[in-house]
Amino acid sequence: MRAVLCRQYGPPGSLTVEEVENPTAEKGQVVVDVKACAVNFPAVLIIQNLYQFKPPLPFSPGAEIAGVVRAVGAGVEGVRVGDRVFASPGWGGLAEQIAVDARSLIPIPDGIDFVPASAFLYAYGTSHYALEDRGRLQPGETLVVLGAAGGVGLAAVEIGALMGATVIAAASSDEKLQVCRDYGATETINYSTEDLKTRVRELTGGVGADVVYDPVGGPYSEPALRATAWEGRFLVVGFAAGEIPAIPLNLALLKGCDIVGVFWGAFVGREPERHRRNVEELVVWWRAGKLRPHVSSTYPLDRAGEAIRELADRKAKGKVVVTVGG
Ligand SMILES: NC(=O)c1ccc[n+]([C@@H]2O[C@H](COP(=O)([O-])OP(=O)(O)OC[C@H]3O[C@@H](n4cnc5c(N)ncnc54)[C@H](OP(=O)(O)O)[C@@H]3O)[C@@H](O)[C@H]2O)c1
């Protein structure tokens, strides 16, 4: 089969596309013919050895896939050859086939294509867990989302609106903010041209945001924390800006607010039953048309490096997907 390979750590341009051995379905595993693989920001990091997970070289990046079951290993129940499925294996998805733990597979609902299915789990899973389980977001509360047109950011905008919050989207361009409005944001802040803290205060009548969702870090976290309401929740999701900010802890004291860590991947491993219930809720919303994965561009497997580059260059809106095979 063909696979995108990271042979040595480096930028997206250093990835190669090569013929490699087909995977086999070991005990408890299933081999999936990959039809689509969504690219996420961790792909930018993992190929440079900057991510928390470090697969041995050479490896294929590509965190989440949708495809068709090709082979089933010993001991697997409830999955059959030909089933349409999606999963979030973390890496290995930018290939024509992948072997995954059968328990991680979720059936693709009827009528939904592979491309949106590949773009579903990571963004919605993270943002749902962040807002509902970690942030305890309530109807009528105000939610500020940073990096709001990115993969997890746009999912947070959509889920926040669905949960009955007033959503303020913050991003770096008016074009990105228009997408956020289409997905349920009622107010927007362009943090390239506007002062984040001042604008959140203005838009909340001086009260501040009940919940802040921060997948960006860098220079945006501290002003957003300073614009958090009394007893608000500040959700630490990621550091796409590159810098992990050092926050003066007195801010948490003065605001009586919570700074809350969100680690969806660890949650999935540690609490599979709660994760399963969360996914069920998301799939119900998806089938009802309440969630609409936004895929702004697609690339063939040969150009997977360009897909990853779009994220590294801060150009993507919603999700970027690599299509595999015919
Ligand atoms: N904690 C968890 O469980 C969890 C789960 C999933 C993802 N994450 C993390 O969440 C972050 C976002 O992931 P994603 O897949 O949604 O990424 P993405 O689609 O690339 O979105 C990231 C957003 O960050 C903003 N950004 C600011 N400075 C940037 C820079 N220098 N380079 C790139 N983007 C920059 C961009 O928005 P603007 O241009 O509008 O600023 C961009 O839309 C990553 O750090 C990822 O590791 C964490």
Image (cartoon, rainbow, N blue to C red):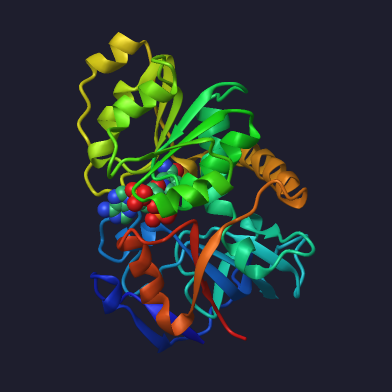
Residue 103 visible from this viewpoint = yes
Q: Taking 187 as reference, is 25 left or right?
A: right
Q: Residue 144 appears at what percent x and percent y?
A: 44, 32
The answer to whether residue 103 is above or below residue 245 is below
Quadrant in which residue 304 is drawn: bottom left
Residue placed farthest to the bottom in the image?
19
Name the foreground residue: 271 vs 249. Answer: 249
Name the foreground residue: 214 vs 191. Answer: 191
Q: Residue at x 51, y 24 (%)?
A: 142
Q: Residue at x 56, y 66 (%)?
A: 65
The answer to whether residue 72 is above or below residue 205 is below
Q: Residue 234 appears at what percent x and percent y?
A: 39, 26
Name the foreground residue: 117 vs 280. Answer: 117
Name the foreground residue: 323 vs 188. Answer: 188
Q: Residue at x 24, y 74 (%)?
A: 8
Quadrant in which residue 184 is drawn: top right
Quadrant in which residue 24 is drawn: bottom right
Q: Residue 241 appears at what percent x and percent y?
A: 27, 48
